[in-house]
Image: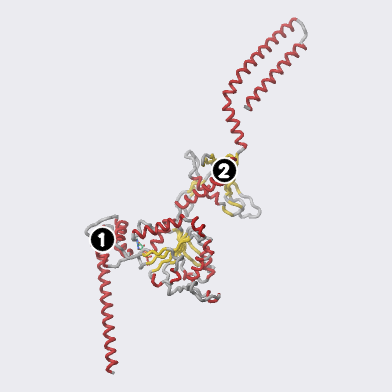
Amino acid sequence: MENTSTLVEHMHSVESSQKRSYINSVKKTPTSSTSKGSSACASRVASLLLVLFRAMQYLIQPIMRLLHPITHAFSKSRSSADELMIMQIEEYHGMSTHNKVFEASELYLHNKMSPSTRLLKIVQTQKETKFAIHFSNNQEFEDIYEGVQLKWKYNSISKKSKYYPSKAGKKQQFFELRFDVKHKEKVMDAYLPYVVETFKAMKDAGKIVKLHTLVRSEDYKVRWSAINLEHPATFETIAMDSEQKRSVLEDLDRFVKRKEFYQRVGRAWKRGYLLYGPPGTGKSSLIGAIANYLKFDIYDLQLTHLMSDMELRRVLLATTNKSILVIEDIDCSQLKLQDRKNSNKKNDSESNQLSLLGRLLNFTDGLWYSCGEERIIIFTTSHKSKLDPALLRSGRMDMHVHMSYCSYEGFKTLASNYLGIKEHQPLFDEIESLLQKTEVSPAQVTEELMKSEIADVALQALITGIKEMNKREEDEKKAKDEERVKNDKEKVDHKQLTYFI
Ligand SMILES: Nc1ncnc2c1ncn2[C@@H]1O[C@H](COP(=O)(O)OP(=O)(O)OP(=O)(O)O)[C@@H](O)[C@H]1O
């Protein structure tokens, strides 16, 4: 409407100026015949113009009314440009603090790249196995969130710093996010958190799980060193009692979903598992399967590598959230525990005598650890009965998982994984009856199954292997029995001899 009224006003001003010029021309013009003729002519032209203008005025108004929706939209778009909100999301806050929102936006926007994008920057560094797509300057992305239109633009500029010359010249990347100012709260309170959450989910899905082990560097400081965890174990490939497998999986699922619960009840968001069973029954494999399932990094804590409390604290504090701290093969004879609850020793010097494992438990029980989130601690042992009660007391090990010798069910899982077979009679029946009589670890079963890719050959090798184990066990038992009889006989002879003397 603004444009219509301006046009009409303009027409009015033209009309009045024409009127004025006509009157002036009548007033000023001399009255000769030629001039009379020409002035009559001029007056006719002027009247004609006036009639034309009037006609146009009557025609224009309905046309303008018809055009109103278009002119209105135009004026609206102009006003919304005035109400545009721009947010700038820079890569760094200050000179070196990484901005998490930038990192999240970067990954999130990879999925928003238009299929019509014609310019892609492809990068692959020596350490990377995949191509990475980098954004080009001024690259734009569009997004719609709950009906709100959002426009993103990527850019980078060279940093200038007189205080940090080493950083000068490096690129500062940033995004500009544009939207209507009336959606400011929605963008701040819902959209940006949604971008960050989506980023976390995407990162977890493509995350490479790391295995951290302790190393001592040249300056004699102990620190974590990481490699990619290439443990292929998954819950599908682990041979264990199916009911037990299901309960471990359920426990893990419940644990990761219960952030609010742990906050509400004021407990550290951590969970402890004790895996126990004979060597080769899959304790380490289960740890690999848990890490792969949750996409949690593993920190393999070899307590014997540590020399002081300070070191223990430092390495524990250097572990990250969403991680599994593993302490394998706890042997209480080497790392004696002292249950603080039942201990009478109170003074500092005596508490310093606590073993490293005891101090680790103090630490994990205490406040320090509650600073972290989503922590899992796994202890493994081949001799549960030898464990100190302090380790087993409730709240420390939330779940005890028994990894046992290979059952027939476990064998079937391994046969399916290694040979791709679900049934093979009569060999399966023979193996079932042999496993009932002999204690064979899953590790021993897999060793035999790997001897051939041909099912018959591999299964026969397993049968021979179990029979040999069985025979060895029987021979050992026989030898022990003979030894006992011999000892008993010697004791009797000795008694008789002393009696006669
Ligand atoms: N339950 C199982 N399911 C599938 N594979 C298994 C299982 N147990 C053992 N294996 C196989 O045997 C190998 C050794 O097993 P693993 O190291 O997990 O046993 P462990 O109980 O941790 O032994 P140790 O107590 O000697 O450390 C594994 O790499 C895997 O191939």
Q: Quadrant of ligand 1?
A: bottom left
Q: Residue at x 47, y 39 (%)?
A: 115
Q: Position of residue 392 (x, y in %)?
A: 43, 68
Q: Residues within 10 Å of mark 1 (few under 14, many from 20)?
A: many
Q: Residue at x 68, y 9 (%)?
A: 44
- Cα distance in 3D space between marks 1 and 2: 63 Å
Picture layout, residue 474 above or below residue 130: below
Q: Residue at x 59, y 29 (%)?
A: 72
Q: Amino acid at mark 1?
A: Leu
Q: Quadrant of residue 137?
A: top right
Which residue is at the far left? 426
Q: Quadrant of residue 427?
A: bottom left
**Nearer the observer, disc 1 or disc 2?**
2
Picture layout, residue 179 above or below residue 263: above
N-terminal of the pair, mark 1 or mark 2, is 2
Q: Nearer the viewer, residue 54 or 472?
A: 54
List the residue tagged with mark 2.
Answer: 177
Residue 206 placement, left or right of 494: right
Q: Position of residue 186 (x, y in %)?
A: 56, 44
